[in-house]
Amino acid sequence: MNHYRAMLCHRLGPPAGPEAADFAMAELPRAALKPGQVRVGVQAAGVNFFDALMLRGEYQFKPPLPFVPGAEAAGIVLEAASDSGNWRPGDAVLLQCRLGAFAEEIVVPGEALLRKPDAYSFAEAAAFPVGATTAWGALVARGDLRAGENLLVLGAGGGMGLAAVALGARLGANVFALASSAEKRQAALDAGASITLDPSDADWLQKLRTGTGGMQVIFDPVGGAISQQALRALAPQGRYLVVGFAAGEAPRFAANRLLLSEAAIIGVRAGEQVRRNPALAAPMRQALQDWLTSDAGRPLIGAILPLENANEALLRLAQRQVLGKLVLRIGL
């Protein structure tokens, strides 16, 4: 087979409407492997909020057109260069990449792969890398979260938030989860949260602060008005981790509040951390493989759609209609 199918973006735009992106199935030529590379037959691909931003041209990484989006996948090794590590055809793997996961196959460096546990479905494995990498990059590499500390996770019912809840619990933190529905709050409890709160409750902030002494770490992939409120829950010398802006607006923080509490606002771009600091690659890789092996905090799959319905998946994400992670079915 010299070609494979992929969802290719030719023109930027939203997932629906008169100005919608030109984003449709295409056949692409298969490229020969370069040294160190592995070809993976993709069984499933995870869908993330930044995929929708990328198609709109609103993400910080702006690939040249045309491109195949998708930053995480799981599948079977089809072919491996001799110097790509211990990978062999037939190995079940998962991976994170910058682009290309919304496709029947993908070529990546051997070091980008992790072994899929037998207990994980391909859908669960495909939903793991981005959330887990972001949670580790935020809570460990940037937030220095310690056992016994209080951690507040905003947007705790989404894939990113649930990964942070699960990792926070694994690290021994007291995890508080803010989520917008009873279903999402239950998912956060199942992932390891001790207490959940409803952002529509006018007293949620007071309830959070009562008896806790404040939050040492706040994980925020949401942004917008809720961030302004959450900042007030930060303990003296706490760390506020800015992970993303799913609400569509970057918050503006009060500098006087930071000064008075000696708190820190810390930006997190987990996908760039290893590129900027290659020394992080080995501990991050080991931490993620250990997490997978532990079988704790497995991703919650909200829905599985066929690859050709990638537009619908991105629209659901943009409208914040998803509990856990959305996954595209490719070879399943």
Image (cartoon, rainbow, N blue to C red):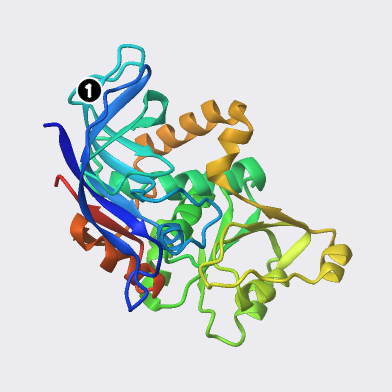
Q: Is residue 157 above or below residue 36?
A: below
Q: Nearer the viewer, residue 185 or 38?
A: 38
* Residue drawn 22% across the image and 36% down it: 29
- x, y percent for residue 151: 61, 58
Q: Amino acid at mark 1?
A: Glu
Q: Is residue 329 left or right of residue 217?
A: left
Instruction: Determine if residue 50 is in view.
Output: yes
Instruction: Determine if residue 306 is in view.
Output: no
- Residue extending farthest to the left is 1
Q: Nearer the viewer, residue 85 or 33?
A: 33
Based on the displayed image, in which of its 4 quarters is residue 274 positioned?
A: top right
* Residue drawn 26% across the image and 60% down it: 310
* Residue drawn 56% across the image and 66% down it: 245
- What is the crowding at mark 1: few (fewer than 14 residues within 10 Å), some, or many (at least 20)? some
Q: Is residue 259 left or right of residue 313?
A: right
- x, y percent for residue 237: 80, 56
Q: Nearer the viewer, residue 226 or 199?
A: 226
- x, y percent for residue 140: 60, 42
- x, y percent for residue 115: 31, 30
Callout 1 secondary element = strand
* Residue drawn 27% across the image and 40% down it: 74
- Tag 1 residue: 79
